[in-house]
Image (cartoon, rainbow, N blue to C red):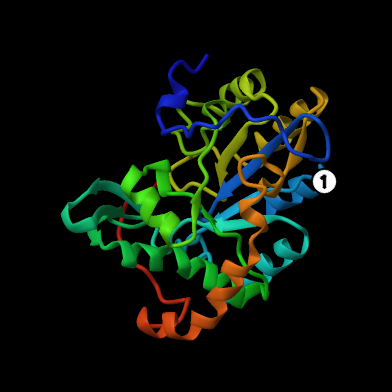
Amino acid sequence: MLLGLTAVVQAQPQSASAPAAAPCDKPVYLTFDTGHMGVAPLIVDTLKRFDAKATFFLAQEPTMDGGQTLDDKWAPWWKQLAEQGHDFGSHTWFHDTWSADLPDGKFRFKRAAGEQVPQNVVLTSAEYCEELKRPARRFLEMTGRPMSMIFRAPAGRTSPALLAAAQACGFRHVGWSASGFLGDELPSDKFPNRALLDQALRRVKPGDILMAHLGIWSRQDPWAPTVLEPLLQGLKARGMCFAPLRDHPEYVAWMRRPQEAVALKATSAAGTAASGGGAGAPGPKDALRR
């Protein structure tokens, strides 16, 4: 057993609302945050084999090939995923993890993703709103489709003030279930794949939001697709199916509000210019693997 596993990363509570209409009466909701992308095609191939729809949260992170997750190389891949019927949300542009609320409505964040040395940055509510909108604008550029107005805070770290600022900007936060933390970002010597798989199969239940990544730099024994395929098979054998967040009772109404996402298109050019460059502009480089 992996005692205390779910305490390693902040779990996000869900209400006990009855499931909305979904492909079956026992849905689970697969979600993936961006990462080094080395296993991203394998993850999507696995989803296809199980006819599983997922929700992806996008940030501009370094990739194993020396690029970035939202650069021109990956743009056709994201477009293909959109055409396959997956859902998409923001993960902030620079993968900024909330650290503290500050006076005058400002927030302190730790800015780090992939092979980057963490930096402490302070953002106003308006600047954080831009952090949320930039992935949405870039997604629209890459796919021609609006991103849903949902976001996941890196590491799931938020505060009431931060959530209020995000919602004033048009975004609603999506966390994950306590039993839906799949552990792919944990060290593989202490949390081997077999143990992660066994715990997930034992604990995941219908209605859970599951969370993993498109590649974690620090994990020596990659979680995907080694764990993903038997996990999906095991959950399917228990009568569960795999639904995108647009079918989740807490988000179904929110995600059917396209006017806000479409409105981002009108500000795309201005926002890109204000940010000091195109969507492929690199973030800070350094040496912490997440």
> Which corner quadrant of the image does residue 57 belong to?
bottom right
> Which corner quadrant of the image does residue 107 belong to?
bottom left
Residue plotted at (54% across, 49% down)? 215
Above or below — where is 286 with respect to 196? below
- In depth, the one of 61 and 272 nearer the eye is 272
Q: Residues within 10 Å of mark 1 (few under 14, many from 20)?
A: few
> Residue beneath label 1, please?
51
Q: Residue 105: percent from the left, percent from the top?
A: 23, 56
Q: Residue 127: percent from the left, percent from the top?
A: 32, 67
- Whether residue 123 is visible to the viewer of this picture, yes or no, is yes
Q: Is residue 157 left or right of residue 170?
A: left
Above or below — where is 259 with respect to 96? below
Q: Residue 33: percent from the left, percent from the top?
A: 53, 50
- The amino acid type found where label 1 is placed reads Asp
Residue plotted at (60% across, 36% down)? 210
Q: Please, which residue is most extreme toward the left here?
A: 103
Above or below — where is 176 with respect to 134? above
Q: Residue 50: percent from the left, percent from the top?
A: 81, 42
Q: Is residue 97 left or right of residue 265?
A: left
